[in-house]
Amino acid sequence: MAVLVTGGAGFIGSHLVEELIKKDQTVIVVDNLSTGKIENLPCSDKVIFIEGDISEKGFVKELFSFYSFDKVFHLAAVASVAKSVELPEETHRTNFDATLYLLESSIGKVNRFVFASSAAVYGDLLELPKREDMPVKPLTPYAVDKYASERYVVNAFRLYGLDSTAVRFFNVFGERQDPSSPYSGVISIFIDRIKRYKNGEDTEIVIYGDGKQTRDFIYVKDVVKALILLSESRDSSGEVFNLGTGSSISLLEILDILKEIVGDLPPVRFEKERKGDIKHSQADISKIKSLGFSPEYSLKEGLEKLLFSE
Ligand code: NAD
Ligand code: UD1
């Protein structure tokens, strides 16, 4: 039986697909290519790409009537928080409705269901590091949809016996993260600006606020390792897990590391703090560690890989 990866042509999804085919799995990728790219996918006869929109119920039903899936990794989403604020109804269809369509189709048919949630569900509550049993405060349509989806996902274990798990990603970085929007992941933007600067372009790094805000950045290969582990563990059913490294770092400290690696950096300009930005974020990862997970890559190793990749 095949494995379904929704959003498999996107940043994180494409790394997961790469790893699954190394494990000799046949992978069906469903993606509407709204932010994903077909070029992100490895060329392999183990990968079947279907262009489609998971917010169309009929499409999801047809997909499940045509294929049998052993596992579903549900990663497709409108991943931009800013876009969810701008277009709440449109993004809700992908970020929430589609989760229900996939769950309903999976109950009684699929052996494992893993859902990509977000640390955004914690909002701006101050207590750190975040544990899964702490209160949540989803502040944007994106965060509300992720939280509602994850409740449906984990409840599907208790109510219908679907082996389902929700994973709250903290700040993921790595190859193929698209730096093209101001709302792209900050590391992808910094790396893009450094590469341009090295090529003689007139560019700069912008920091919103004082640069002392902190995040828990996890390298994408570690995220993939965790997703596969969760999909293989019986103890993860009906549970929510944080996925970060357990430590956080400020933007200014990241710039110091980048300077150490590449020498000089583009000029840095400070702008007003972004509205709605949270100051600090850090995961408590004891729960996922108890299943045997530990991150392999340090932030510096991940940054070096990115800087010296094409
Ligand atoms: P991404 O935008 O690269 O990937 C999302 C993929 O979903 C894209 O390929 C896109 O084309 C596809 N997609 C969007 N709407 C679709 C639809 N209606 N039908 C089919 N495909 C659709 O983003 P990513 O960073 O790889 O994010 C993957 C998942 O991880 C998302 O669910 C995101 O919310 C979650 N997440 C990411 C981060 C991060 O730091 N990158 C943090 C927390 C959570
Ligand atoms: C990120 C994710 C979000 C996820 C959340 C969970 C991205 C794009 N966003 O949000 O989907 O739900 O983590 O933890 O991956 N910044 C700059 N300069 C820039 C760009 C950003 O200073 O050029 C600042 C931002 O203002 C922010 C910090 O860097 O303070 C991190 O920003 P960003 O990478 O967008 O991530 P989050 O907002 O944490």
Image (cartoon, helix red, strand yellow):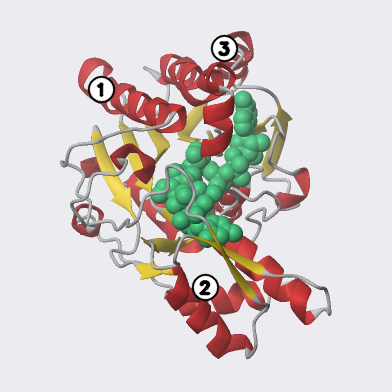
Q: Which residue is mark 3?
A: 61
Mark whose residue sits in front, 1 or 3: 1
Mark toward the start of the polypeptide (1 vs 3): 3
Labels 1 & 2 near each other (Cβ < 8 A): no
- Tell me: residue 291, above or below residue 69: below
Labels 1 & 3 near each other (Cβ < 8 A): no
The three-letter code of the residue at mark 2 reads Gly
Numbered circle sitting on residue 302: 2
Q: Classify mark 2: helix, strand or loop.
A: helix
Q: Position of residue 5 (x, y in %)?
A: 55, 37
Rendering quadrant holding ligand 1: top right
Crowding at mark 3 (Cα within 10 Å: few <14, some 14-19, many 20+): some
Q: Position of residue 270 (x, y in %)?
A: 55, 66
On the image, which quarter does residue 52 sit in?
top right
Name the residue nearer the viewer: 141 or 203. 203
Residue 7 visible in the picture: no
Mark whose residue sits in front, 3 or 2: 2
Mark 3 vs mark 2, CA separation in Å:
39 Å
Residue 239 visible in the picture: yes
Mark 1 residue's CB less than 8 Å from ligand 1: no
Q: Position of residue 216 (x, y in %)?
A: 37, 61
Mark 1 vs mark 2, CA separation in Å:
35 Å
Numbered circle sitting on residue 155: 1
Q: Classify mark 3: helix, strand or loop.
A: helix
Q: Classify mark 1: helix, strand or loop.
A: helix
Mark toward the start of the polypeptide (1 vs 2): 1
On the image, which quarter does residue 76 sit in?
top right
Q: Position of residue 181 (x, y in %)?
A: 67, 49
Mark whose residue sits in front, 1 or 2: 2
- Tell me: residue 58, above or below residue 124: above
The three-letter code of the residue at mark 3 reads Lys
